[in-house]
Image (cartoon, rainbow, N blue to C red):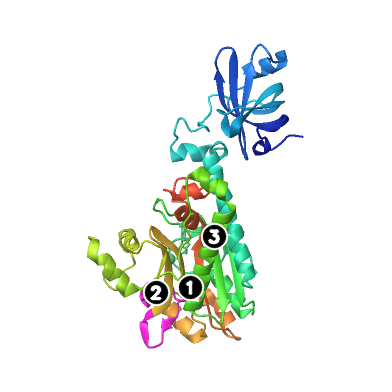
Amino acid sequence: MHLPIRTVTPESESAAIIGWVHEIRDLGGLMFFLIRDRTGIIQVTIPKKKVPAEVLDAARDVSRESVVRVRGRVKAIDKAPGGREIVPDGLEIISLAGSPLPLDVAEKVPAEMDTRIDSRFLDARKPRVRAIFCIRSAVTCAATEFLHSRGCINITTPKIVAAATEGGTELFPIAYFEKEAFMNQSPQLYKQMMMAAGFEKVFEIGPIFRAEEHNTIRHLNEATSLDVEVSFADHNDVMELLEDLIVYVYESVAGTCGDDLAELGISLSIPGKPFPRIRYEEAIEIANRTIEDKLSFGDDLTPAAERAIGSGIGQHYFIVDWPTDIRPYYAMPYPDRPELCKAFDMMHPRMELSSGAQRVHDHDLLVERIRAKGLAPEAFEFYLKAFRYGMPPHAGWGLGIERLVMTMLDLGNIREAVLFPRDRHRLTP
Ligand code: ATP
Ligand code: MG
């Protein structure tokens, strides 16, 4: 049996470990190895004259990033990582790594994003990269815990669909036997149909596919969305649910991911509740004070506008009461001012994290809204049907998991927050 490297302490007498060769240094009479597993790094010191011949042979043959098994005596030593080292009685090469390596796991030589993704399995051996994905795992786990605790049912909806959620061109067509089908942009229509099913509160964490042609640091062609839909709720109710979720997830990560945060050099500050609410009209006014390309009513916020507003506010916030014309047909217009709707975006100072709204639950109004967007209600018959036999009022939102992780950990590029990014130029690995 081997031990996780972290559990080997200066007080241990002996240890048997398995790991990857992180670094090799040969100082003549002495050889030093750093051996790494997902729990940490340990130094292995080989006094050439004092170890068995097999150990010395293996030490000479082994290359960086090979998998080795080491057993030996543990000595306390101040200068080594973790204050201990192993002097081996046994050193066995389990899997020899080829050289040169496609990238340097020890990060002495920096690598471009593309090189890193091309060899993502090697890149993810870096403690810093692994820490990001351990935190991402904690984020989705905490979100699931939180939503279960609020009575939400975890659902799975189809990703191969016949119709676009919102019309438009951001769709990947696929061949589905003798028909044309699409990769789903969002679970929107399906989660709403589950409101008609009386599930009342649902959530899904799953892929969304967007055929956006532009390459940016905050867009992927395959992203992960946390979608929530709640019956007998309005936009204000689900905004509260969303800010509670964000705070819960931050607290949970701060409480359970101390080592990973330390690896990344981050001390997480928990967002304060309630997040400020700014009306769309106020938002463009604030942005127009500093940005060059001025916005007028009915314009979507540009990235420059988002940054201008965000830097003034300096924390998570909501933009509410959007022009009906620039939101999807399913967003509920205010009855007394139908040019505005009960839609919101939840923002991090750097970018949008989530969009949501109270939805139209009246069948005839929904048909009218679909037509107003220039879409054909016939294409949405499977969806509209759910509005004809008792549809409760409902509201919900979709939150991008990669953007949540990216902003939480202050990552420069969304590709840092996804193992195998899909973008305009990348379909492998
Ligand atoms: P943006 O305007 O920033 O491109 P959007 O308004 O098109 O985003 P929505 O359709 O509102 O995105 O999707 C809800 C959330 O899903 C977004 O706030 C974002 O966090 C995430 N998301 C949407 N599209 C992408 C994408 N292409 N890559 C990564 N995350 C995305
Ligand atoms: Mg949006």
Bounds of the magenta span? 322-340
Residue 14 vertical placement versus 211 (above, below): above
Q: Amino acid at mark 3?
A: Glu
* Residue found at x 43% / y 56%: 212
Alpha carbons under labels 2 and 1: distance apart: 10 Å
- Which quadrant of the figure has residue 310? bottom left
Which type of secondary structure does the marked residue at label 1 adopt?
helix
Which residue is at the front of the view, 379 or 22?
22
Against 222, is 25 above or below? above
Which residue is disc 1 drawn over?
239
Tell me the quadrant of ligand 2. bottom left
Q: Which picture quadrant has residue 299? A: bottom left
Does residue 326 sit above or below 112 in this rendering?
A: below
**Residue drawn at the location 53% of the way across and 24% of the way down:** 100
Q: Secondary structure at mark 3?
A: helix
> Circle 3 is placed at which residue position?
251
Mark drawn on residue 320: 2
Q: In which quadrant will I find the N terminus?
A: top right
The amino acid type of the residue labelled 2 equals Val
Q: Judging from the image, what secondary structure is the residue with disc 2 in?
A: strand
Does residue 168 appear left or right of residue 12 in this picture?
left
Q: Earlier in the sequence, mark 2 or mark 3?
A: 3
Q: Is the CB of mark 1 within 8 Å of ligand 1?
A: no
